[in-house]
Image (cartoon, grey):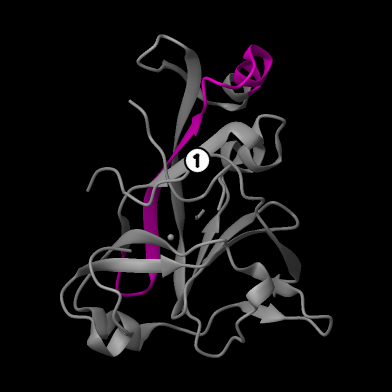
Amino acid sequence: MNRRQIMTGAGALLVAVLTGCMSPAGRTGQRYNEQIASVLISGDGRYLVALSPDFHYVFEAPPVLVQSIRGVFHPFVSAMPAVFRVRHDGTTEGDLYLTVSPEAAPGLVEAALAAGYQPQQDERGRAGAIARVRLNGKRYSALLVEKEASYSLNRIYDVPVEVDGSAGEVIAAAVASPVSRAADGVLMLFGAPLVAIPHTGKTDSKAVGK
């Protein structure tokens, strides 16, 4: 049950949503691919933020996810998102699968298990670990926020998104993002600075489940 993906080390969350790469006005239907260019975590560890050209996804950061980003086993963590579901009010939920590579030292795998991971073995019988993380949050419009190139990932990632109702209805109902820029250029969320998640692990943009 090898799962690889987008956010590495939680990594690049969020890292990234389903078939098309069109502008919001051109989206039709209820499923599409969201292109995620940046994934950040608030300095206080409370929120995970995924940035796309049109939307900002703000999630509460579960403890196991924070430990995956800040823990000693972080360099060996890869992540893969399942479909993100967006309701009319912008409420968003989805699962994120985090895996610790069997190439990690036994002590690092043990640290992941202590953080809430479950043991798993690869096809060669090597011990690793996996965690299924439920993300809950909200999607906001990014139109009023300046883009910051320094937060960009080394590539664009696609995350599967399923909207409740037509894409046009959800886009029209989106409220302005709470992400703002401080005078020194640092992006802020609810008064806390946002920090880019270090890029580690091996990634895959495919999603798991429906």
Q: Nearer the viewer, residue 134 or 5?
A: 5
- Return the residue found at the far top: 125
Expressed as whole percent of the image width and height from the top left, the position of residue 39 reads 57, 60
Q: Residue at x 55, y 26 (%)?
A: 116
Q: Depth check: give the residue in front, 178 or 113.
A: 113
Q: Is residue 64 above or below residue 183?
A: above
- Most distant residue in the right direction: 184
Q: Is residue 163 visible?
A: no
Split into 4 quadrants, where in the image is the N terminus? top left
- Tell me which residue sits at (54%, 45%) in the image: 8
Image location of residue 86, percent across then percent down:
32, 66
Q: Give the residue pinned by disc 1.
A: 202
Query: Residue placed at 71% from the left, 73% from the top?
Result: 188
The x, y position of residue 3, in whole percent, is 38, 35
Front in this rendered view, residue 78 or 40 = 78
Instruction: Place residue 62 in its image quadrant.
Output: top right
Q: How many marks?
A: 1
Residue 98 covered by magenta stretch: yes
Magenta segment range? Answer: 86-111
- Seen in the image, is 54 located left or right of residue 195? left
Residue 184 against residue 156 in the figure, above or below: below
Element assignment for label 1: loop
Q: Residue at x 40, y 46 (%)?
A: 204
User: Could you say which quadrant of the image residue 93 lies in?
Assistant: bottom left
Amino acid, disc 1: Lys
Q: Residues within 10 Å of mark 1 (few under 14, many from 20)?
A: some
Q: Is residue 204 above or below residue 53?
A: above
Queried whether the magenta region covers residue 99, the answer comes back as: yes
Q: Could you tell me residue 16's position as x and y percent?
A: 43, 60
